[in-house]
Amino acid sequence: MPHLLNKKDTKRQAVIVIHGIGEQIPMTTLRNFVENVLDEKPDSNTPLYYSKPDPFSKSFELRCLATPGNTRPRTDFFEFYWQNLMPQAQWSKIFDWAWFMMNRSVKTVPSQFCSIWWILWIGVVTLCILTLVSLVYAGFHPQERTETLIKIPFGIAAIWLFLQGLFLSYVGDAATYLRAHPRNIAARHEIRSAGVSLLNSLHRSRKYDRIIVVGHSLGSIIGYDILNFAWQQYCDKHGYSERPQRDSLSKAETLAVYIHKMIDNGEEIPKARRDEWMDLTKKVGRELRTNNHSWLVTNFVTLGSPLAHADLLLAKSRRDLKQKIEQRELPVSPPVVDQKGTFAKAINYKLPDGSHRTTFVPHHAAWTACVRWTNLYFPCHWLLKGDFVGGPLSPLFGSGVQDVPVSTKIRGGWFSHTYYWAKDHNNNWAESNSIRNLRLALDLQGKGYRPIDREDPQ
Protein backbone atom coordinates (compact mmCIF):
# COMPACT_ATOMS: atom_id res chain seq x y z
CA MET A 1 0.00 0.00 0.00
CA PRO A 2 1.48 3.38 -0.95
CA HIS A 3 2.71 5.44 1.94
CA LEU A 4 1.90 9.14 1.87
CA LEU A 5 3.86 11.89 3.58
CA ASN A 6 1.94 13.11 6.59
CA LYS A 7 0.50 16.56 6.03
CA LYS A 8 1.65 17.82 9.40
CA ASP A 9 5.26 17.00 8.50
CA THR A 10 5.33 19.23 5.43
CA LYS A 11 7.38 22.38 4.99
CA ARG A 12 10.53 20.93 6.51
CA GLN A 13 13.92 20.99 4.84
CA ALA A 14 17.44 19.70 5.42
CA VAL A 15 20.72 21.47 4.70
CA ILE A 16 23.94 19.44 4.33
CA VAL A 17 27.11 21.48 4.88
CA ILE A 18 30.38 19.94 3.65
CA HIS A 19 33.55 21.43 5.10
CA GLY A 20 36.79 22.06 3.24
CA ILE A 21 40.44 21.10 3.74
CA GLY A 22 42.48 21.33 6.92
CA GLU A 23 42.32 19.59 10.27
CA GLN A 24 38.66 20.42 10.82
CA ILE A 25 37.03 19.96 14.23
CA PRO A 26 33.54 18.37 14.12
CA MET A 27 30.68 20.90 14.23
CA THR A 28 32.95 23.96 14.16
CA THR A 29 32.15 24.76 10.53
CA LEU A 30 28.46 23.96 10.91
CA ARG A 31 27.89 26.09 14.01
CA ASN A 32 29.63 29.09 12.51
CA PHE A 33 27.76 28.63 9.23
CA VAL A 34 24.32 28.37 10.86
CA GLU A 35 24.85 31.29 13.24
CA ASN A 36 25.77 33.57 10.35
CA VAL A 37 23.33 32.56 7.63
CA LEU A 38 20.19 32.44 9.78
CA ASP A 39 18.35 35.66 10.38
CA GLU A 40 18.35 37.09 13.87
CA LYS A 41 16.29 35.08 16.35
CA PRO A 42 12.60 36.00 16.20
CA ASP A 43 12.36 37.06 19.85
CA SER A 44 14.63 37.34 22.85
CA ASN A 45 13.22 34.21 24.49
CA THR A 46 13.74 31.92 21.51
CA PRO A 47 17.20 30.62 20.57
CA LEU A 48 18.39 30.83 16.99
CA TYR A 49 18.60 27.04 16.82
CA TYR A 50 18.52 23.92 18.96
CA SER A 51 21.24 21.26 19.04
CA LYS A 52 19.62 17.85 18.64
CA PRO A 53 21.01 14.32 18.23
CA ASP A 54 21.93 13.53 14.63
CA PRO A 55 19.95 10.36 13.81
CA PHE A 56 21.59 9.94 10.40
CA SER A 57 25.25 10.07 11.33
CA LYS A 58 27.33 7.19 12.58
CA SER A 59 29.47 9.56 14.62
CA PHE A 60 28.66 10.62 18.18
CA GLU A 61 30.61 13.84 17.54
CA LEU A 62 27.96 15.27 15.20
CA ARG A 63 24.69 17.00 16.01
CA CYS A 64 21.72 18.34 14.09
CA LEU A 65 21.18 22.09 14.43
CA ALA A 66 17.45 22.70 14.05
CA THR A 67 15.53 25.96 13.85
CA PRO A 68 12.73 26.46 16.42
CA GLY A 69 9.30 25.03 15.70
CA ASN A 70 7.75 28.46 15.23
CA THR A 71 9.92 29.20 12.18
CA ARG A 72 8.68 28.45 8.69
CA PRO A 73 9.92 26.44 7.03
CA ARG A 74 11.62 24.39 9.73
CA THR A 75 15.24 23.69 8.82
CA ASP A 76 17.60 20.98 10.05
CA PHE A 77 21.30 21.59 9.41
CA PHE A 78 23.67 18.63 9.15
CA GLU A 79 27.41 18.50 8.70
CA PHE A 80 28.89 15.90 6.41
CA TYR A 81 32.15 15.42 8.26
CA TRP A 82 34.73 13.55 6.21
CA GLN A 83 38.02 14.54 7.87
CA ASN A 84 38.16 11.34 9.92
CA LEU A 85 37.93 9.33 6.70
CA MET A 86 40.94 11.08 5.21
CA PRO A 87 44.21 9.24 5.94
CA GLN A 88 47.11 11.20 7.35
CA ALA A 89 48.79 13.07 4.54
CA GLN A 90 52.16 11.89 3.35
CA TRP A 91 54.83 13.77 1.48
CA SER A 92 54.86 11.07 -1.17
CA LYS A 93 51.27 11.96 -2.12
CA ILE A 94 52.05 15.67 -2.30
CA PHE A 95 55.17 15.04 -4.37
CA ASP A 96 53.13 12.79 -6.64
CA TRP A 97 50.51 15.51 -7.08
CA ALA A 98 53.17 18.17 -7.69
CA TRP A 99 54.82 15.99 -10.32
CA PHE A 100 51.40 15.41 -11.89
CA MET A 101 51.08 19.18 -12.32
CA MET A 102 54.67 19.68 -13.46
CA ASN A 103 54.49 16.85 -15.96
CA ARG A 104 52.12 18.84 -18.18
CA SER A 105 52.78 21.26 -20.94
CA VAL A 106 52.47 24.83 -19.72
CA LYS A 107 49.99 25.36 -22.57
CA THR A 108 47.50 23.02 -20.85
CA VAL A 109 47.83 24.70 -17.45
CA PRO A 110 45.08 27.24 -16.58
CA SER A 111 46.43 30.79 -16.58
CA GLN A 112 45.82 31.21 -12.85
CA PHE A 113 48.09 28.21 -12.15
CA CYS A 114 50.87 29.07 -14.58
CA SER A 115 52.76 30.92 -11.86
CA ILE A 116 52.62 27.83 -9.61
CA TRP A 117 53.81 25.64 -12.49
CA TRP A 118 56.82 27.91 -13.01
CA ILE A 119 57.50 28.15 -9.26
CA LEU A 120 57.56 24.35 -8.97
CA TRP A 121 59.95 23.94 -11.86
CA ILE A 122 62.19 26.82 -10.78
CA GLY A 123 62.22 25.45 -7.22
CA VAL A 124 63.21 21.95 -8.38
CA VAL A 125 65.94 23.26 -10.67
CA THR A 126 67.23 25.62 -7.98
CA LEU A 127 67.33 22.83 -5.40
CA CYS A 128 69.26 20.60 -7.75
CA ILE A 129 71.77 23.36 -8.50
CA LEU A 130 72.27 24.23 -4.81
CA THR A 131 72.73 20.59 -3.92
CA LEU A 132 75.32 20.14 -6.66
CA VAL A 133 77.16 23.34 -5.68
CA SER A 134 77.23 22.39 -1.98
CA LEU A 135 78.65 18.98 -2.78
CA VAL A 136 81.34 20.47 -5.01
CA TYR A 137 82.15 23.14 -2.41
CA ALA A 138 82.44 20.57 0.37
CA GLY A 139 84.75 18.50 -1.80
CA PHE A 140 87.17 21.37 -2.36
CA HIS A 141 87.01 22.67 1.26
CA PRO A 142 87.16 19.60 3.50
CA GLN A 143 88.12 21.70 6.55
CA GLU A 144 84.72 23.47 6.41
CA ARG A 145 82.77 20.30 5.75
CA THR A 146 82.04 19.57 9.44
CA GLU A 147 80.81 23.11 10.18
CA THR A 148 78.62 23.09 7.07
CA LEU A 149 77.09 19.72 7.91
CA ILE A 150 76.20 21.02 11.38
CA LYS A 151 74.44 24.15 10.10
CA ILE A 152 72.52 22.56 7.26
CA PRO A 153 70.28 20.27 9.38
CA PHE A 154 68.99 23.16 11.49
CA GLY A 155 68.05 25.20 8.42
CA ILE A 156 66.45 22.24 6.73
CA ALA A 157 64.54 21.35 9.90
CA ALA A 158 63.08 24.86 10.22
CA ILE A 159 61.98 24.88 6.58
CA TRP A 160 60.66 21.33 6.87
CA LEU A 161 58.47 22.13 9.92
CA PHE A 162 57.01 25.16 8.14
CA LEU A 163 56.23 23.20 5.00
CA GLN A 164 54.84 20.30 7.00
CA GLY A 165 52.39 22.54 8.85
CA LEU A 166 51.36 24.30 5.64
CA PHE A 167 51.18 21.45 3.16
CA LEU A 168 50.44 18.29 5.12
CA SER A 169 47.52 19.88 6.99
CA TYR A 170 45.94 21.50 3.94
CA VAL A 171 47.34 20.49 0.57
CA GLY A 172 47.57 16.88 1.73
CA ASP A 173 43.77 16.47 1.80
CA ALA A 174 43.40 17.86 -1.70
CA ALA A 175 46.27 15.76 -3.03
CA THR A 176 44.70 12.62 -1.58
CA TYR A 177 41.16 13.21 -2.79
CA LEU A 178 41.80 14.73 -6.21
CA ARG A 179 44.43 12.28 -7.42
CA ALA A 180 43.08 8.88 -8.47
CA HIS A 181 46.27 7.13 -7.42
CA PRO A 182 45.98 3.52 -6.20
CA ARG A 183 47.00 4.64 -2.69
CA ASN A 184 44.09 7.13 -2.63
CA ILE A 185 41.27 5.00 -4.01
CA ALA A 186 40.13 3.58 -0.66
CA ALA A 187 39.86 7.01 1.00
CA ARG A 188 38.01 8.49 -1.98
CA HIS A 189 35.57 5.60 -1.93
CA GLU A 190 34.94 5.85 1.82
CA ILE A 191 34.24 9.58 1.68
CA ARG A 192 31.88 9.34 -1.28
CA SER A 193 30.08 6.32 0.16
CA ALA A 194 29.52 8.09 3.47
CA GLY A 195 28.15 11.15 1.68
CA VAL A 196 25.75 9.12 -0.47
CA SER A 197 24.66 7.20 2.63
CA LEU A 198 23.79 10.44 4.43
CA LEU A 199 21.79 11.66 1.44
CA ASN A 200 19.98 8.33 1.21
CA SER A 201 19.17 8.40 4.92
CA LEU A 202 17.60 11.85 4.63
CA HIS A 203 15.48 10.66 1.71
CA ARG A 204 14.37 7.48 3.45
CA SER A 205 13.41 9.32 6.63
CA ARG A 206 10.50 10.93 4.76
CA LYS A 207 10.79 13.95 7.08
CA TYR A 208 11.83 16.47 4.45
CA ASP A 209 10.31 18.16 1.44
CA ARG A 210 13.61 19.38 0.06
CA ILE A 211 17.35 19.03 0.63
CA ILE A 212 20.02 21.68 0.06
CA VAL A 213 23.68 20.70 -0.37
CA VAL A 214 26.41 23.26 0.42
CA GLY A 215 30.10 22.61 -0.23
CA HIS A 216 33.04 24.83 0.64
CA SER A 217 36.46 24.47 -0.98
CA LEU A 218 37.30 20.76 -1.42
CA GLY A 219 33.89 20.08 0.10
CA SER A 220 32.30 21.47 -3.08
CA ILE A 221 34.01 18.77 -5.17
CA ILE A 222 32.95 16.14 -2.65
CA GLY A 223 29.40 17.49 -2.85
CA TYR A 224 29.51 17.37 -6.65
CA ASP A 225 30.65 13.74 -6.53
CA ILE A 226 28.02 12.80 -3.95
CA LEU A 227 25.23 14.24 -6.09
CA ASN A 228 26.61 12.45 -9.16
CA PHE A 229 26.69 9.04 -7.50
CA ALA A 230 23.44 9.49 -5.58
CA TRP A 231 21.51 10.60 -8.65
CA GLN A 232 22.69 7.49 -10.50
CA GLN A 233 20.70 5.52 -7.93
CA TYR A 234 17.64 7.76 -7.99
CA CYS A 235 17.25 8.56 -11.69
CA ASP A 236 15.63 5.15 -12.34
CA LYS A 237 13.34 5.37 -9.32
CA HIS A 238 9.89 6.74 -9.96
CA GLY A 239 6.38 6.78 -8.61
CA TYR A 240 3.23 5.56 -10.29
CA SER A 241 1.48 8.77 -11.24
CA GLU A 242 -1.78 8.31 -13.09
CA ARG A 243 -1.04 11.40 -15.18
CA PRO A 244 2.73 11.82 -15.50
CA GLN A 245 3.70 15.33 -16.59
CA ARG A 246 6.53 16.38 -18.90
CA ASP A 247 5.86 20.01 -19.86
CA SER A 248 8.66 21.60 -17.81
CA LEU A 249 11.14 18.88 -18.73
CA SER A 250 10.40 19.37 -22.44
CA LYS A 251 10.89 23.12 -22.11
CA ALA A 252 14.19 22.52 -20.30
CA GLU A 253 15.38 20.21 -23.10
CA THR A 254 14.46 22.78 -25.75
CA LEU A 255 16.35 25.50 -23.89
CA ALA A 256 19.34 23.19 -23.35
CA VAL A 257 19.56 22.58 -27.11
CA TYR A 258 19.44 26.33 -27.72
CA ILE A 259 22.14 27.10 -25.14
CA HIS A 260 24.52 24.37 -26.32
CA LYS A 261 24.08 25.49 -29.92
CA MET A 262 24.99 29.06 -28.98
CA ILE A 263 28.06 27.80 -27.11
CA ASP A 264 29.15 25.75 -30.12
CA ASN A 265 28.83 28.87 -32.27
CA GLY A 266 30.93 30.87 -29.82
CA GLU A 267 28.03 33.15 -28.88
CA GLU A 268 27.49 34.59 -25.41
CA ILE A 269 24.42 33.32 -23.59
CA PRO A 270 22.03 36.20 -22.78
CA LYS A 271 21.28 36.75 -19.12
CA ALA A 272 17.58 36.26 -19.81
CA ARG A 273 18.27 32.73 -21.05
CA ARG A 274 20.42 31.95 -18.00
CA ASP A 275 17.65 33.18 -15.70
CA GLU A 276 15.12 31.15 -17.66
CA TRP A 277 17.19 28.01 -17.12
CA MET A 278 17.48 28.64 -13.38
CA ASP A 279 13.70 29.02 -13.21
CA LEU A 280 13.18 25.83 -15.21
CA THR A 281 15.32 23.79 -12.81
CA LYS A 282 12.81 24.63 -10.08
CA LYS A 283 9.90 23.69 -12.30
CA VAL A 284 11.49 20.43 -13.44
CA GLY A 285 12.19 19.43 -9.85
CA ARG A 286 8.63 20.27 -8.86
CA GLU A 287 7.32 18.35 -11.85
CA LEU A 288 9.34 15.26 -10.90
CA ARG A 289 7.93 15.39 -7.38
CA THR A 290 4.43 15.78 -8.81
CA ASN A 291 5.15 12.57 -10.72
CA ASN A 292 6.04 11.00 -7.36
CA HIS A 293 9.75 10.83 -8.13
CA SER A 294 11.72 10.42 -4.91
CA TRP A 295 14.58 12.91 -5.50
CA LEU A 296 14.49 15.82 -3.00
CA VAL A 297 17.68 17.84 -3.66
CA THR A 298 16.68 21.25 -5.00
CA ASN A 299 19.78 23.43 -4.51
CA PHE A 300 23.52 22.93 -4.76
CA VAL A 301 25.64 25.82 -3.45
CA THR A 302 29.41 25.89 -3.99
CA LEU A 303 31.68 28.31 -2.13
CA GLY A 304 35.29 28.93 -3.17
CA SER A 305 35.16 25.85 -5.36
CA PRO A 306 38.30 24.31 -6.92
CA LEU A 307 35.98 23.07 -9.67
CA ALA A 308 36.88 26.38 -11.30
CA HIS A 309 40.15 24.63 -12.21
CA ALA A 310 38.62 21.30 -13.22
CA ASP A 311 40.66 21.20 -16.43
CA LEU A 312 43.73 20.93 -14.20
CA LEU A 313 42.37 18.95 -11.24
CA LEU A 314 39.91 16.54 -12.89
CA ALA A 315 41.36 16.18 -16.38
CA LYS A 316 44.60 16.22 -18.32
CA SER A 317 43.62 19.30 -20.33
CA ARG A 318 40.68 21.45 -21.38
CA ARG A 319 40.15 19.09 -24.29
CA ASP A 320 40.15 16.04 -22.00
CA LEU A 321 37.64 17.75 -19.70
CA LYS A 322 35.36 18.49 -22.64
CA GLN A 323 35.53 14.86 -23.72
CA LYS A 324 34.55 13.65 -20.23
CA ILE A 325 31.60 16.04 -20.30
CA GLU A 326 30.46 14.83 -23.73
CA GLN A 327 30.74 11.22 -22.54
CA ARG A 328 28.49 12.07 -19.57
CA GLU A 329 31.18 11.34 -17.03
CA LEU A 330 31.09 14.86 -15.61
CA PRO A 331 27.61 16.47 -15.45
CA VAL A 332 27.20 20.09 -16.52
CA SER A 333 24.33 22.58 -16.48
CA PRO A 334 22.39 22.43 -18.75
CA PRO A 335 23.02 18.71 -19.28
CA VAL A 336 24.52 17.50 -22.55
CA VAL A 337 21.75 16.53 -24.99
CA ASP A 338 21.81 13.62 -27.42
CA GLN A 339 21.26 13.73 -31.18
CA LYS A 340 17.51 13.83 -30.62
CA GLY A 341 17.88 16.96 -28.51
CA THR A 342 16.93 15.32 -25.22
CA PHE A 343 18.57 14.48 -21.88
CA ALA A 344 15.66 12.47 -20.50
CA LYS A 345 14.86 8.79 -20.80
CA ALA A 346 11.46 7.12 -20.96
CA ILE A 347 10.41 4.71 -18.19
CA ASN A 348 7.34 2.55 -18.70
CA TYR A 349 5.23 1.20 -15.85
CA LYS A 350 1.85 -0.36 -15.21
CA LEU A 351 -0.87 0.95 -12.90
CA PRO A 352 -2.84 -1.38 -10.59
CA ASP A 353 -5.72 -1.39 -13.07
CA GLY A 354 -3.41 -2.78 -15.75
CA SER A 355 -3.13 0.39 -17.84
CA HIS A 356 0.30 1.48 -19.05
CA ARG A 357 1.99 4.83 -18.46
CA THR A 358 5.29 6.40 -19.48
CA THR A 359 7.22 8.89 -17.39
CA PHE A 360 10.40 10.75 -18.33
CA VAL A 361 13.39 11.20 -16.02
CA PRO A 362 16.72 13.00 -16.64
CA HIS A 363 19.48 10.48 -17.37
CA HIS A 364 22.34 9.57 -15.03
CA ALA A 365 24.35 12.74 -15.78
CA ALA A 366 21.44 15.19 -15.85
CA TRP A 367 20.69 15.91 -12.19
CA THR A 368 21.52 19.53 -12.97
CA ALA A 369 18.17 19.74 -14.80
CA CYS A 370 16.32 19.66 -11.47
CA VAL A 371 18.91 21.14 -9.08
CA ARG A 372 19.65 24.85 -9.00
CA TRP A 373 23.44 25.29 -8.91
CA THR A 374 24.76 28.55 -7.47
CA ASN A 375 28.48 29.28 -7.15
CA LEU A 376 29.87 32.06 -4.94
CA TYR A 377 33.47 33.20 -5.27
CA PHE A 378 35.76 36.06 -4.32
CA PRO A 379 37.47 37.36 -7.49
CA CYS A 380 41.22 36.81 -7.19
CA HIS A 381 43.86 39.51 -7.74
CA TRP A 382 47.63 39.08 -7.45
CA LEU A 383 47.17 35.50 -6.17
CA LEU A 384 46.64 36.59 -2.56
CA LYS A 385 43.76 39.10 -2.67
CA GLY A 386 40.40 37.41 -2.94
CA ASP A 387 40.16 33.65 -3.26
CA PHE A 388 42.81 31.89 -5.29
CA VAL A 389 41.10 28.52 -4.86
CA GLY A 390 37.67 29.49 -6.17
CA GLY A 391 36.42 31.17 -9.31
CA PRO A 392 33.57 31.15 -11.85
CA LEU A 393 32.33 27.70 -12.85
CA SER A 394 30.10 28.47 -15.82
CA PRO A 395 33.00 28.54 -18.33
CA LEU A 396 33.67 24.87 -17.56
CA PHE A 397 30.39 23.51 -16.16
CA GLY A 398 27.86 25.32 -18.29
CA SER A 399 25.90 28.52 -18.45
CA GLY A 400 23.27 27.03 -16.17
CA VAL A 401 25.59 27.52 -13.18
CA GLN A 402 24.81 30.86 -11.58
CA ASP A 403 28.17 32.46 -10.76
CA VAL A 404 27.95 35.16 -8.10
CA PRO A 405 31.10 37.20 -7.39
CA VAL A 406 31.09 38.46 -3.79
CA SER A 407 33.32 40.72 -1.73
CA THR A 408 34.43 41.22 1.84
CA LYS A 409 36.26 43.93 3.74
CA ILE A 410 37.65 41.54 6.33
CA ARG A 411 41.46 41.92 6.19
CA GLY A 412 40.92 44.18 3.22
CA GLY A 413 39.90 41.20 1.11
CA TRP A 414 43.25 39.41 1.44
CA PHE A 415 43.27 35.63 1.96
CA SER A 416 39.46 35.51 1.88
CA HIS A 417 38.97 31.82 1.09
CA THR A 418 37.30 31.11 4.45
CA TYR A 419 35.17 34.27 4.66
CA TYR A 420 32.09 33.30 2.66
CA TRP A 421 29.85 33.22 5.74
CA ALA A 422 32.07 35.35 8.00
CA LYS A 423 30.63 38.50 9.55
CA ASP A 424 32.74 41.60 9.85
CA HIS A 425 31.75 42.80 13.31
CA ASN A 426 33.30 46.18 12.60
CA ASN A 427 31.40 46.67 9.36
CA ASN A 428 27.95 45.39 8.38
CA TRP A 429 28.93 45.75 4.72
CA ALA A 430 30.32 42.21 4.68
CA GLU A 431 27.02 40.77 5.89
CA SER A 432 25.05 42.69 3.29
CA ASN A 433 27.26 41.29 0.52
CA SER A 434 28.69 37.80 0.84
CA ILE A 435 26.27 36.56 3.50
CA ARG A 436 23.29 38.18 1.81
CA ASN A 437 24.14 36.44 -1.46
CA LEU A 438 24.68 33.17 0.38
CA ARG A 439 21.22 33.46 1.94
CA LEU A 440 19.72 34.06 -1.50
CA ALA A 441 21.54 31.01 -2.88
CA LEU A 442 20.30 28.80 -0.03
CA ASP A 443 16.72 29.95 -0.63
CA LEU A 444 15.67 28.77 2.82
CA GLN A 445 12.20 30.22 2.33
CA GLY A 446 11.70 27.73 -0.48
CA LYS A 447 10.20 30.11 -2.99
CA GLY A 448 9.03 28.15 -5.97
CA TYR A 449 8.94 24.86 -4.05
CA ARG A 450 5.90 23.38 -2.41
CA PRO A 451 5.35 20.23 -0.33
CA ILE A 452 3.73 17.40 -2.29
CA ASP A 453 2.26 14.11 -1.10
CA ARG A 454 4.55 11.38 -2.39
CA GLU A 455 4.08 7.68 -2.84
CA ASP A 456 6.82 5.18 -2.12
CA PRO A 457 9.27 5.06 -5.07
CA GLN A 458 9.76 1.91 -7.08
Image (spheres, helix red, strand yellow):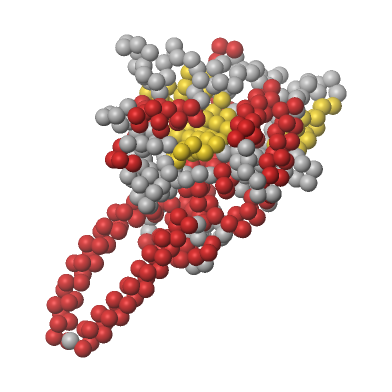
- 39 and 147: which is toward the camera: 39
- The residue at the point 40 percent across, 68 percent down is 121
Quarter of the view holding residue 363: top right
Relative to 411, is 3 above or below? above
Q: Quadrant of the C terminus?
A: top right
5 is higher (above) or lower (below) than 109? above
Point 45% across, 41% down: residue: 377
Residue at (54% x, 42% y) in the render: 224
Would residue 351 be found to the left or right of residue 377 on screen? right
Q: Nearer the viewer, residue 107 or 242?
A: 107
- Tally of marks: 0
Q: Position of residue 47 (x, y in %)?
A: 34, 17
Residue 61 appears in the picture as rendered:
no
Quarter of the image that includes the N terminus: top right
Tell me residue 242's x, y (percent): 78, 20
Residue drawn 80% across and 32% down?
Answer: 348
Picture coordinates of residue 99, whole percent (x, y): 45, 66
Residue furthest to the right: 355
In this view, 359 is above or below 155: above
Residue 245 in view here: yes
Residue 402 left/right relative to 98: right
- Quadrant assignment, res 355: top right
User: Hey, which quadrant is residue 455 in on the image?
Assistant: top right
